[in-house]
Every structure is written in structure tokens, then in C-alpha cells.
Amino acid sequence: MPFRQTPRRRVESRDKNATNFQEEQTMKRSCVGSVVLTAALVAVSPFGYAQGSDIGKQEYLSNCASCHGKDAKGGGPVAGSLKLKVPDLTVLAKK
């Protein structure tokens, strides 16, 4: 039985079809992934806001209150040991 060589055009056509199929599958996966991610973010977002009101206060107390004080007027426990006067943060709101 003699070996029959496939015409070049058919091979190229099959390669293009396979490539197109792979690209379509990748696009479908990307779209489905985007939809799932969006749905997850929408579902979880209301729960994130419940904690969001205290985050700023916690951040200030852990990083700023030692110098600026709990009332933000510059009288924190570390303020006396600093070379520069600690600014009163309450006047920033007035500007």
C-alpha cells in the first residue's frame, strides 16, 4: 500500500480550525470566570461595608494616636519625646 501524502491545504485548514476552537474555548472560560467573579463580588460586598465603619478608627488608634492622641489634638503619650511639636489634626478639618 503506497503512502499517500495529505495535501498541504487540508493540514493548514485543520490547524486553523483547531486553533480557532482553542481560542473559542479560552474566550468562553474567560467570560464564565468574569461572570462568576462579578457575582461573587456583588454577593460579598454588603458584608464588607458592615466592618468598614470601624476600619479607619482602628487604623488611627494603632498608627497615629500614640503621637497625636486619641482626640487628635497632639497630646499623645509619645508626643513629649519628639523634637518637633505634633500638629493638631482637628484644625485640618476646619481648612
Image (spheres, rainbow, N blue to C red):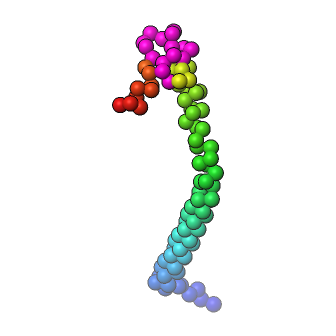
Q: Residue 15: horizontal and vertical position, in percent?
A: 51, 77
Taking 90 as reference, is 54 above or below it? below
Residue farthest bottom in this picture: 1
Taking 37 as reference, is 82 above or below it? above
Relative placement, left or right, of 91 versus 50 is left
Q: Please name the residue shown 62% across and 43% down the image.
A: 51
Q: Please name the residue shown 45% across and 26% down the image.
A: 90
SS majority, magenta: loop
Q: Please name the residue shown 53% across and 24% down the image.
A: 71
Q: Residue 6: horizontal and vertical position, in percent?
A: 53, 85
Nearer the observer, 25 or 12: 25
- Residue 95 sits in which quadrant? top left
Residue farthest left in this picture: 95
Taking 52 as reference, is 89 above or below it? above
- Residue 29 sits in which quadrant? bottom right
Magenta-span inclusion, residue 68: no
Nearer the observer, 45 or 13: 45
Q: Residue 73: horizontal and vertical position, in percent?
A: 48, 21
Nearer the observer, 81 or 24: 81
Q: How many marks?
A: 0
Q: Please name the residue shown 54% across and 14% down the image.
A: 78
Q: Which residues are magenta?
A: 72-86
Residue 30 showing in the rendered view: yes
Magenta-span inclusion, residue 75: yes
Nearer the observer, 9 or 16: 16
Where is the N terminus found, in terms of image quarters?
Answer: bottom right
Residue 33 showing in the rendered view: no
Residue farthest front in this picture: 94
